[in-house]
Image (cartoon, rainbow, N blue to C red):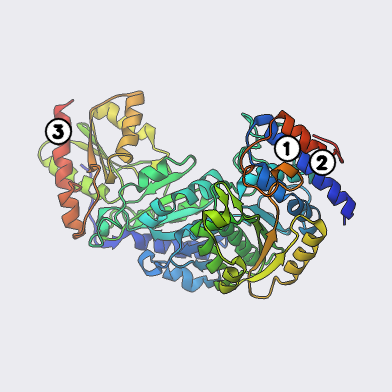
Amino acid sequence: MKTYTYTEKKDTRSGFGAGLAELGRTNPNVVALCADLIGSLKMDKFIEENPERFFQVGIAEANMMGLAAGLTIGGKIPFTGTFANFSTGRVYDQIRQSIAYSGKNVKICASHAGLTLGEDGATHQILEDIGLMKMLPGMTVINTCDFNQTKAATIAIAEHQGPVYLRFGRPAVPVFTPSDQKFEIGKAIKLTEGKDVTIVATGHLVWEALEASKVLFERGISAEVINIHTIKPIDEKAILESVSKTRCIVTAEEHNIIGGLGESVARVLGTHNPAPQEFIGTNDVFGESGTPAQLMEKYGLNSISIVAKVESVLKRK
Amino acid sequence: MPSTQHLNDLTIQVRRDILRMVHKVNSGHPGGSLGCTEFLVALYNVIMSKKAGFNMDGIGEDLFFLSNGHISPAFYSVLARSGYFPIEELNTFRLIDSRLQGHPTTHEGLPGVRIASGSLGQGMSVALGAAQAKKLNKDYHLVYSLHGDGELQEGQNWEAIMYASAKKVDNIIATVDLNGQQIDGSTESVLPMGSLKQKFEAFGWIVVEIEEGNNIVSILNGMSEAKSKTGQGKPVCVLLKTVMGNGVDFMMHTHAWHGKAPNDEQLAIGLAQNSETLGDY
């Protein structure tokens, strides 16, 4: 079995900051907006190097989304930065009308997604954002797994014409994807070959899925782990090919199981090739305060939970 | 520049378009549309500097954003009669498979429309973004926008109003249609807003008032004054005092025709008060 290791842990939001800084040097049309969270979004470098292309909006996310839509008229490629909660739920109608329905080329970049925001608690831990964004016609939805992938995705979405929701997080997590790996929107990455079960994971759960696959290997279970960074459009081919071999699947995400990756996968399977599925995700609840690790354990979003779900799904084959 | 006579003729023709459009589909918003007819006619025929054809980016020309999208009948009529699309297409207003949706959208590719509007309160932010893009592009043309007075009850406007002066966006002229009416009644009865002039000024805007917002000459003078105040480090607001339903006597001075279409008899009366000038679509 192919195994993955890492030499350092970094936060995915820093990958966004690094990608944005690179775009600042390479694409003169890229502009950035922030609603009073420059430090949290790691936008400092872009701002330092391109002050005229940065717009500090203040604590006014609705205005920020409208400004971004307007900036596209004249050829700019706006990247908005704030927490996932304030990037989606707070401004849903602004995104819906001024960006998605209007077909504007805005990149909505959302940090501190999910439970791993930690101690600030449920007011800030949005677990519904993937669902909100994937329901909007024409919206591309991406949830990256580590520093390198987040940096690559940030650079890639500037080349994509149309609105994008890019979701990443706060805590330092293992950096295990190659720094030179090209990011292809909508193209899932098979991390391990397996024959007994497919594990499709997104965001912070990708590393947990790899950890789970090691434990499963020791128990004689061969897991195929797929990193599905793009939730919409979803890579149907990759899912169906894998499941046609393994005949069962576990999906894993730091999001409500209602409206998230798992439901998108279930739709693909239900339409083309039904197979037993188990879901890793929060189950229709709000989060709470705690350390990221405590929260991921309490809500069943770690490698131990993935192993348990795999054992369940195998019994249903 | 077109003669005042021509502009007045055009205004009457647009009024006929509005009445006929909403009557045909028994839906739409004639009141606010009629109240803003003179303004939109003046804007598209005299005030704005426009290039031929339509390009979304609008570089090298003035731009307009309609925030109160429900007055789409007036907007569509003026766009069609300014050459953005065939006037016959006004026949398709609110019908299935039409580019003339109930509220304006870019989604169907209708030339002249740069943003969807209808859900209120979003247009000022968009106009400001477009104005800042013009500055980045060193494009010294202006951005115009139109907002309802009731629409200012939406909080996003005040985020945008605060932002505009803080960032010295001085290439925008945002016009507020002060007709004093909204769906549930007068703005005074629904949610009194006090002095909008004082509010905009307190937020750092230059305010120009147009007392006769249904008089073409007053509009041209007022907008000319507003233009002269751009480029001075402050955003410019025009408070345009209009009469909802202007030009159709039974629709005037009431909120009743905000979102209601005339029946056959009412249409006939309205059209009789606005005799055909430049030809119906």
Q: Residues within 10 Å of mark 3 (few under 14, many from 20)?
A: some
Chain of the residue that carries numbered disc 1 in the rendered image: B
Label 3 is placed on what type of residue? Answer: Ser
For mark 1, give the secondary structure.
helix
Label 2 is placed on what type of residue? Answer: Asn
Chain of the residue that carries numbered disc 3 in the rendered image: A
Mark 3 vs mark 2: same chain?
no
Which residue is more in the foreground, B121 or B48? B121
Which residue is more in the foreground, A231 or B73? B73
CA gap, disc 3 and disc 2: 75 Å
Which residue is more in the foreground, B168 or B57? B168
The answer to whether residue A76 of the structure is visible from this angle is no
Q: Earlier in the sequence, mark 2 or mark 1?
A: 1
Residue A195 position, x and y percent, is 22, 31
Mark 1 vs mark 3: same chain?
no
Mark on residue B19?
1
Q: Which residue is mark 2?
A: B274
Q: Which residue is mark 3?
A: A312
Say if B219 sits above or below B19 in the image: below
Which residue is more in the foreground, B212 or A224? B212
Of badges 3 and 2, the one in the foreground is 2
